[in-house]
Image: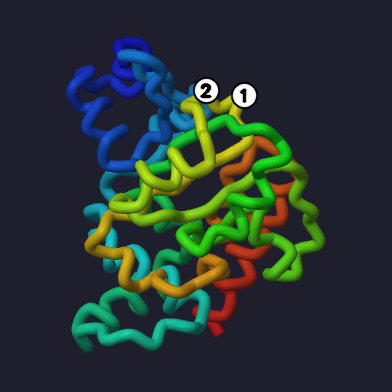
Amino acid sequence: MREAAGILGVTPGRVRALVTSGYLPASKISDRWLLEHGAVVRRQHEDPARGRPFTPRNAWALLMLASGEFSGELNPSVRSRLKRALRQEGLERLRPRLGGRARALPYRTHPGEAPYLLEDPLLVRSGISAAAEQGLGLVSGREADGYIAANDLEMFVKNHALAPAVQAEANVRLRVVPDEAWPLLVSRIVAPKAAVALDLSEDPDARSAQAGRQVLRELDQTWKE
């Protein structure tokens, strides 16, 4: 925490708040928080003046709008504001404001267990675990990446015997969605295309990250036409 605070020029308390709110990925081993250096550096270079973070529900509404599939109820003024943000900013520039959609937690499990995680109806697949459904030409190995409701996290971890891990040793990434926003994802198997692309673009694997960024550019282009 102190090292990250020094890089960002904020207090350790502020770093802790960024972690707990999902804006900085981290894992907790015993009583210590371990942060990804790359995520801290990205945060350092983000422009905080681009606007306030979206609420979890509005973050998901925006991602669904960007994917061309939002069909839920949405206040007309909110819908208009989200569409304007997509036209004027685009997904890549909006990335810093979308962190509240979920809090990413790394875990470790036996490689043979990963396929069973992906078949669990509590998990909404994303990142590399959803790349095939999005036609991105990427193949997932023995790993799992997906969104899960905060209320289901404890049971899911127990059912699949997951152990907290540092990012370098993790083969499971659970993206914990606040319960207030989860109704927008209920009954889904795969996350919206924009969410999958965002998650891929942050993948340590260069090929996955490139594919994710390409999809983000394509989605942004549809809002400029």
Residue highlighted by disc 1:
169
Whether residue 46 can be seen here: yes
In the picture, the disc for residue 32 is none
Which quadrant would the C terminus be assigned to in this image? bottom right
Q: Position of residue 7 (x, y in %)?
A: 37, 18
Q: Is residue 62 above or below residue 97?
A: below
- The residue depicted at 36 percent of the width and 19 percent of the height is 33
Mark 1 in CB contact with mark 2 (< 8 angstroms) = yes
* Towards the viewer: 119 or 150: 119
Which residue has dot 2 on it? 166
Up/down of 59 relative to 222, above or below: above
Which is more toward the observer, 8 or 203?
203
Where residue 31 sits, quadrant-wise, is top left
Q: What percent of the width, then of the height, locates residue 144?
A: 62, 47
Residue type pointed to by label 2: Val
**Structural distance between the alpha carbons of marks 1 and 2:** 6 Å
Q: Residue at x 20, y 27 (%)?
A: 14
Horizontally, is 160 left or right of 100 in the view? right
Q: Position of residue 56 (x, y in %)?
A: 28, 59
Direction from residue 51 to residue 83 in the image, left or right: right
Residue 190 to residue 12: above or below = below
